[in-house]
Image (cartoon, rainbow, N blue to C red):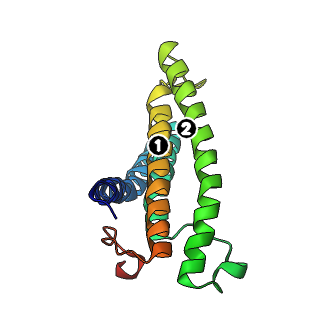
Amino acid sequence: MPGPVIAYLKVVEGLNYRIGRFAMYLLYAMMAILLWSSFTKILHFPAIWTLEMAQFTLVAYYMLGAPYSMQLGTNVRMDLLYARFTTRGQAAWDVVTIFFLMFYLGVMLWGAFDSTAYSFSVTERAPSAWRPPLWPIKLVITVSFALMLLQATAHLIRDIAVMRGADLPPPPVTPEAR
């Protein structure tokens, strides 16, 4: 494979690896927020921001972890026939189906970008007592869709390499190394 393709794989997979590893710790942040919510309710001084902040943190955890999950191959896959294919057969099937995923991600990225731009331009706020601005979480969602599209492209490159019998450097972490 050409050098720029290998460089693309290293950059995209390295970025998604780092962001995915960071996103794993957002679960602890969400638990801390919910714990704080419990303490303030016990003290009869409930915080109005905790539930919504926990929801935002969960969205960031889920969305930023998706490209990392795809990189590790831990995403949900229908294994009815797929597991019976050879390695090249699986790669060929992935090459066909990844275009459906990329189309979906492209549409979602477009919508997320429009929603984020609108939210930022009108300073959209959540309809709650806390009324936080919504553009930060919408920006996280937009970035997540972009990272997922980049990871899908890296996955496509790896599948084409498998079909051609070409050697590529391994991703930052393989599922076996977890």
Residue under the point 44% across and 70% down: 161
Crowdedness near tag 2: few (<14), some (14–19) or many (≥20) residues, C-alpha within 10 Å: many
Q: Disc 2 residue type?
A: Leu
Q: Residue lying furthest right in this view? A: 80
Depth check, front residue: 96 or 170: 96
Quarter of the C terminus within the rendering: bottom left
- The image shows residue 29, relative to residue 76, as above or below, that is above
x then y, percent, for residue 32:
39, 51
In the image: residue 82, left or right of residue 65: right
In the image: residue 48, left or right of residue 89: left
Residue under the point 52% across and 29% down: 113
x then y, percent, for residue 86:
58, 85
Q: Disc 1 residue type?
A: Ala
SS category of the residue bearing label 1: helix
Q: Mark 2 sits on what residue?
A: 109
Mark 2 and mark 1: span between their CA atoms?
6 Å
Quarter of the N terminus within the rendering: bottom left
Quadrant of residue 96 in the image? bottom right
SS category of the residue bearing label 2: helix
- The image shows residue 176, relative to residue 9, as above or below, that is below
The answer to which of marks 2 and 1 sits earlier in the sequence is 2
Q: Residue lying furthest top in this view? A: 122
Crowdedness near tag 1: few (<14), some (14–19) or many (≥20) residues, C-alpha within 10 Å: many
Q: Which mark is residue 146?
A: 1
- The image shows residue 130, relative to residue 137, as above or below, that is above
Can residue 103 be seen by looking at this rendering?
yes
Label pair 2/1, CB-CB below 8 angstroms: yes
